[in-house]
Amino acid sequence: MKKEYPVDVICQFTAEGKMIPIKFRIKEEEYKEFRIISYNEKYRHLEYRQGFLTDYQIVSEIDYTCRVWEDEEREIEKEVCLRYCMREMRWRYLIK
């Protein structure tokens, strides 16, 4: 089971509307900030809705598996998972 924690994310949007996470921060005792080196996105939880003329599907969540600098000076990386919930417009940090 995964635990989810709220997280602040800074992201960029392309001209096509694609969301690119750049960095994020987590509040522990103090805020800890991570710069994203690379990411892989996966669309999750397609919801099917009934429209007037046709049925259609929407993406309700996007998971980002990110490589981040845990310690940039010593060049130590780690892999983390971020989730963006479209309905709530909120980011979550996932811990396995």
Image (spheres, rainbow, N blue to C red):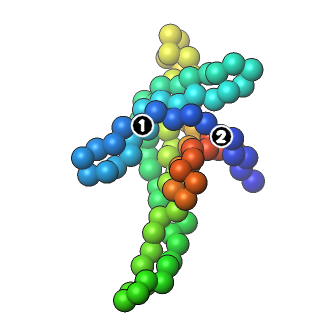
- Tell me what residue is drawn at x 75 percent, y 53 percent: 1
The relative height of residue 69 versus residue 48 in the rendered view (above or below) is: above
Where residue 47 sits: x, y (%)? Answer: 52, 72
Which percent across, then down, holds residue 82? 56, 43
- Which of marks 2 and 1 precedes in the sequence? 2
- Residue bearing the label numbered 1: 11
Q: Quadrant of the C terminus?
A: top right
> In percent of the image, x 42 and y 32: which residue is there?
22
In the image, farthest residue toward the front: 52
Question: Where is mark 2, residue-wise?
Answer: 6
Question: Going by the image, does 92 lie left or right of 48?
Answer: right
Above-or-below relation of 3 to 52: above
Position of residue 49 relative to residue 95, above or below, is below
Q: Is residue 57 left or right of residue 89?
A: left
Query: Which residue appears at 34% of the width and 49% of the height?
Result: 18
* Residue 73 drawn at (x, y percent): 50, 10
Q: Are marks 1 and 2 in contact (CB under 8 Å)?
A: no
Q: Crowding at label 2, few (<14), some or many (≥20) Cα neighbours within 10 Å?
A: some
Above/below status of 21 relative to 51: above
> What's the mark number on residue 71?
none
Q: CA distance from mark 1 to mark 2?
A: 15 Å
Picture residue at 51% right of the left edge, 56% below the top: 86
Where residue 65 appears, x then y in whole percent? 51, 44
Is residue 77 visible to the viewer in this orientation of the structure? Answer: no
Q: Is the residue marked by circle 1 packed among few (<14), some (14-19), or many (20+) residues within 10 Å? A: few
